[in-house]
Every structure is written in C-alpha cells, then in structure tokens.
Image (cartoon, grey):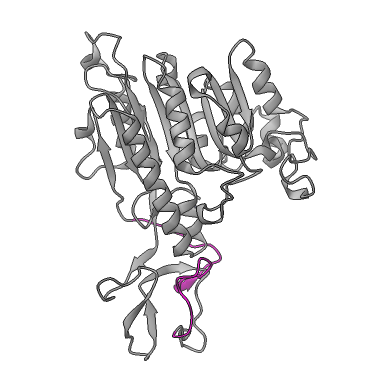
Amino acid sequence: MKQINLLGKSVGIVTTTRVQHATPAASYAHSASRKWYSDADMPDAAKTDGCTDIASQLLKNTDIDVIIGGGRKYMTPKGTKDPEYPRDYSSRGKRKDGRNLIDEWQSMKIGKVAHYVWNKTDFNAVDPETTDYLMALFEPGDLHFETERDPNMDPSIVETTEKAIRILQKNPKGFFLLVEGGRIDQAHHSGRAYMALHETVAFDYAIAKGLELTKEHETLTIVMADHSHSVTFNGYPFRGQSILGKSPLWATDVLPYTTLMYGNGPGHKITNGKRPDIRDVNTKNKDYVQLAAVPMQSATHSGEDVAVLARGPMAHLFQGVQEQNYIAHAMAYAACVGADIRHCQGQTEAHAVHTIFTNDKNGAGAACGLPALLSSLLSALLALVVLM
Ligand SMILES: [Zn+2]
C-alpha cells in the first residue's frame, strides 16, 4: 500500500473489525506482534527497544486517505469515555502514553477536508466529492455482526465500501483499497455458522458494489480468503433444504446431524460417547453453535487451498495453484510498483486504475499502466475467512 501511495495514488482500508486488526494492520504497520493494538498491549521491553504500537502507525507510515472500521479505544488516552458507550468501562480509551490519535490525525490534516466520524448520521453527511480524508471508527473494538448491527448507528460493509471508493476514485492516478469482511472468521472461531454465512453474504454484496462502481477495463479487483476454517458441508441434505438445517437421514447412532459441522471448536458436545439429540433443536438460530469433533474454546483455521478470484487488468495472473506469497508480488507487478516494472514503461500517466482488494492480497494494476485499486474483500465462500 505504501508503494502504491508513493506513486500518487490514493489508498484506503475498510474492515468490519477494528482497523488495528491483523489484515488491515498488515497493510500499514510493522509489528512484532499482531496484538500490539495500542501501547498498553506492548511489553515495556518492546517500547524500550523502540517498537511502536499498531494504532500509532496508522498515522505515520502511509498517508492513508480512507480508514473505516472499528477500534476507537486504541486511539484515545486511558480512561477516555467512549462517545457511544460512556458508561461501559471496557470501551474506554486504552492508551498509556496519553496520546489522542484521533485529535492528532485531525491536526495533521489541516488545510485538507478531513472528517472523523463515529456514527451513521455523521457518516452519511460525509460528501465523497468534497472529502480528502475520512477516518470512521464505529465501535470501540470490532464492529457488530451484520445481523446484529443497528442500521441507525452503524453502516453496512456495502455502505462503507461505497463511500471509500467514491472518495478514492476522484484521484485521476487511481487508487488502492483493501476491503475486509473480517468477522466471517470470527464467527467461525465461535463455531457459529449462521453468523459466518450472513457475514459472507454481506461481504458478497460489498463485492458487487465494488464491481458496480468500477470499470473492468481499468480496475483490477481481487477477492480472496487468507485461509479457511474447519467447517465442513455434510451430505446428503435433500434438495432445497436450508444450509443451516439437519440431514433428513440419521447417522448410525440413530441421531440426525446438521449439514454444517466443524472439525474442532466450542461446539464439541460428546458426552458418554453420544452426540446431542438435536431433533428438537432449532439449528437455524443465529446463536446456534454447530457440533465439533474436537473440543476447542476457539475453532482453528484450516489448511486447504482457498479461492482467489480476479477481474480486470492482469487478472490472468491470478489463476492456477499458487503459493500465497505469490499474490502480493503479482499485485505489485499489476500495479506497476516494485522491482520489475519494465512492462509498465512507455505507459502514459493519465490512466486511472482502481483496484479493489480482498483480503489478503491482491493488487491491482492495470495492464499497460493503469493503476489499480485493490479491493480486498476477504473471504469468500462459506468457509473462508480472515485472520482472527
Ligand atoms: Zn481467524
């Protein structure tokens, strides 16, 4: 993202987690631990050695035009009351160094049109046409799951993705955008297939919005997952049955089983060698936790290959079976940044490229010199998800 930004293209991150979380942080921060959200999360030895927390790096490493997600509490001094949950102690500011990074960010943008917002009303009032910078932090930590989101307080990932693209695409040189459906992963960690699937559907709508707002001939869009989860799809449900339902067939223990299940996780309920009898259980409930073979407080990621889907200039680079580290290099190549840009020489500068990424990787780029904007939408079909 920094390399693309240095070329004069606009850059942004959109996530449903805190903006200091693993995937967005990887685009702008350098940290020995993914959990150093604020300085309060760091050991003294790390600070002594000159390490800095992820939230503070949000302001200084790359000139990020659009920052949208959660994570207010890592930006304000310890004890600072949250504007939305003033009575909730756990939502209060965390920083031990006394810095207010939101105020600092605003003071850094003097002379520009920069908006900081934390609720839907103020977010809706942001006019993309006149806005240079936007920082939107809708929760103290991660955002709510889509099905539990208050539409009057927080925008959907479709709305945040649209706002980001409309702000970034004003740059004639192009832009790079990372969009993460980050709570798909978190729902899977909890063994909650209902939540994971609804998060995935919301993410899918965001992808559609990204494709609608960009042109295929100038914007490389990559949609992918950074890894999968141990969720599995059991046969043989009848045609037309809910993915969250139960098999009409019973297992050899004379009990039904859900179509979706986990290899491990909090849903392990084997007692005395018997699975729970779910004949009278509503497995389509949003809080239902699918059965897991191995007991784990948090379900693990899993190791199979995940899908990478691409549209636009240089999309042909994203096919076949590839090691994950290939993706970043292919994105850089497509975006005309990095060590080898011979294929970009001779291009005119006027092309606009937008890229939209998806989670982990992707780049954008354009053939012959279009910049690209990556919209990185993470996750993908059912099982995949983002880092936890
Ligand atoms: Zn995870």
Is 294 included in the stretch rendered in magenta? yes
Residue 275 horizontal/vertical position (percent): 45, 84
Is 193 included in the stretch rendered in magenta? no
In the picture, the quarter occupied by the N terminus is top left
Q: Vertically, is 104 above or below 278?
A: above
- Quarter of image, res 170: top left
Q: Residue drawn 25% across and 42% down?
A: 322
Q: Residue drawn 47% across and 31% down?
A: 163
Any part of residue 331 in sight: yes
Give the total number of marks visible in the rendering.
Answer: 0
- Along the horizontal axis of the image, is 330 left or right of 193? left
Residue 304 horizontal/vertical position (percent): 32, 56
Q: Residue drawn 69% across and 22% down?
A: 104
- Along the horizontal axis of the image, is 247 left or right of 165? left
Magenta-drawn stretch, dominant element (helix, strand or loop): loop
- Along the horizontal axis of the image, is 349 left or right of 145? left
- Along the horizontal axis of the image, is 170 left or right of 54? left
Q: Residue drawn 44% across and 41% down?
A: 158
Any part of residue 372 in sight: no
Q: Give the range drawn in magenta.
A: 279-303
Q: Vertically, is 129 above or below 163?
A: above
Q: Which of 141 and 161 is in front in this view?
A: 161
Q: Vertically, is 63 above or below 38?
A: above
- Quarter of image, res 108: top right
Residue 68 horizontal/vertical position (percent): 54, 34
The single residue placed furthest to the bottom in the displayed view is 254
Q: Vertically, is 254 above or below 127?
A: below
